[in-house]
Image: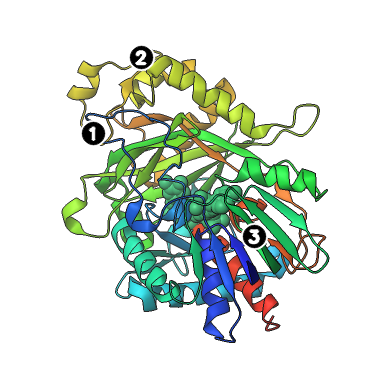
Amino acid sequence: MKYDIIIVGAGPGGIFTAYELTRRQDGKKIAVFEAGHPLHMRRCPIDGDKVKSCVRCASCSIMSGFGGAGAFSDGKYNITNDFGGTLYEHIGKKRAIELMKYVDDINMQYGGQGTKLYSTAGSHFKKLCLQNKLNLLDASVRHLGTDINYVVLENLYAELKDKVDFYFDTPVRKVEVTEDGYRIGCDDGTYECDKCVISVGRSGSKWMQQVCEELEIGTKSNRVDIGVRVELPAVIFSHLTDELYESKIVYRTEKFEDRVRTFCMNPHGIVVNENTNGIVTVNGHSYEGAEKQTENTNFALLVAKHFSEPFKDSNGYGESIARLSNMLGGGVIVQRFGDLVRGRRSNEKRIAEGLVEPTLSATPGDLSLVLPKRILDGIIEMLYALDKIAPGTANDDTLLYGVEVKFYNMEVEIDERLQSRYPGLYIIGDGSGVTHSLSHASASGVHVARDILGMA
Ligand SMILES: Cc1cc2nc3c(=O)[nH]c(=O)nc-3n(C[C@H](O)[C@H](O)[C@H](O)COP(=O)(O)OP(=O)(O)OC[C@H]3O[C@@H](n4cnc5c(N)ncnc54)[C@H](O)[C@@H]3O)c2cc1C
């Protein structure tokens, strides 16, 4: 089977490549190969009741399938160059923002209309943060919410399904360079194409590394972010979240001058388990619909670690810490902030007596036995700093869930067209290590589609 363009991976990167390519309707034959299921068949068996932990499905429905890792996410599309990836280093800041705005327009056309776009522009919180040694990063954020995000994906699939050949449950095993293009190998045979766009995200990181080794495409190690998820009564952060929804705040610790940052803020949200290759870490969601909202807000506090010489495996370091927490807690550990600073583990009784009702059933424990001192000290310092702009943050009953780990793919050598050293072989999205977010990954797809169409 021969195609003009083959896209590997149906996450935001792959979807927006396909969307932009099909808009031209110039008769190009396009195929998308996806290791996971179609959207409607994506179901994680963990229900917190009968199935409490990962049963290692052949394809993880949280990370894989149409919609990629973001399908059940909070659907926060941050329009900014300040975080979410370094796409701007390849395509320029202006273009990166233009493409993120374009992606936002498409999301609005396909079901997102009516959702709110928040912005830090002109916010008085910028000054308040600076007065308290905190830096509020600039961004606009479209919050689709888990429910609307799903609707947008359904609509995008309906738009694409008759224009593109989708191969679900079809992991690509091999990419070969041929005389006039590329050949990809799957379990049921091989497929050829003139141009190939690889967008395999975080779940495809090991495979991506293998492809880069086989094709001698350069790579370099990336960082890992390690920390906790904080859960507190929504009213404590409501002045910030009502105006900004998500505030990305960075603090430089006095002790080590490390940078600690807030990440993935979920007003009235829930804390959830996340499973990466059988390692259970913590994450958060929130819903746009009022009926699913809670009394709590959650967000992560993360510290970045990057190893290069002689130890290069930043992700391996993060995995080891997460494994340790799983060993001690059988999964995610939860601790009251008051217990942490008093040097004692939390127990069921103290958590039950606290003012914050946990939204995730986790094992009460002691995070100081899991997190390296330097990271934990930074998190504690930041909680006290946040307490100055949102009094109550450092209350004894504030809950800390651990560990939260953000893994990043190694960075692949690609040029300003997001093309590898092989003409027509593009590597985009989180799989390239260049993007780490829905908006950047989607924008990278549009950029490559326009390059292929000669519109860049
Ligand atoms: C729980 C959760 C919540 C998140 N919330 C947010 C958020 O609110 N805002 C935000 O900006 N970001 C969020 N993110 C991150 C965001 O989802 C990713 O940055 C984004 O999905 C990256 O898009 P992508 O297309 O590069 O990769 P992915 O979305 O990971 O998609 C890659 C696809 O490729 C497929 N694949 C992998 N290997 C192969 C192969 N060999 N053959 C065929 N297919 C393959 C995978 O199955 C997957 O479907 C969240 C992530 C998670 C896990």
Q: Is mark 1 within 8 Å of ligand 1?
A: no
| Whole-number angstrom distance, CA of label 3 to CA of label 2 | 43 Å
Horizontal side of residue 444 vs 167, given as left or right: right
10 Å neighbourhood of mark 1: few (<14), some, or many (≥20)?
some
Q: Earlier in the sequence, mark 2 or mark 1?
A: 2
- Circles 3 and 2, Cβ within 8 Å, touching? The answer is no
Q: Which residue is mark 1?
A: 356
- Residue of label 3: 428
* Secondary structure beneath label 3: loop
Residue carrying label 2: 345
Q: Residue at x 29, y 45 (%)?
A: 236
Q: Whole-percent x and y of residue 417?
A: 73, 69
> Does residue 266 appear left or right of residue 320 in this picture?
left
Given residues 158 and 241, the one toward you in this image is 158
Residue beneath the point at 36% across and 62% down: 149
**Between residues 329 and 426, which one lies in front from this camera angle?**
426
The C terminus appears in which quarter of the rendering?
bottom right
Q: Give the image location of residue 25, x and y in percent.
A: 54, 86
- The answer to whether any part of residue 7 appears in the image is yes
The residue at the point 26 percent across, 49 percent down is 268
Q: Which is in the foreground here, disc 1 or disc 3? A: 3
Q: Amino acid at mark 3?
A: Ile
Residue 331 or 77: which is nearer the viewer? 331
Task: Report if residue 392 is visible in the image.
Answer: no
- Coloration of the structure image: rainbow
Compute the Cα span from label 2 to label 1.
Answer: 17 Å
| Mark 3 or 2: the one toward you | 3
Question: In this picture, is 186 found above or below 166?
Answer: above
Residue 427 coordinates in the image, percent (x, y): 68, 59
What x and y, as percent, mark residue 413? 78, 54
Task: Give the label on residue 284, or none.
Answer: none
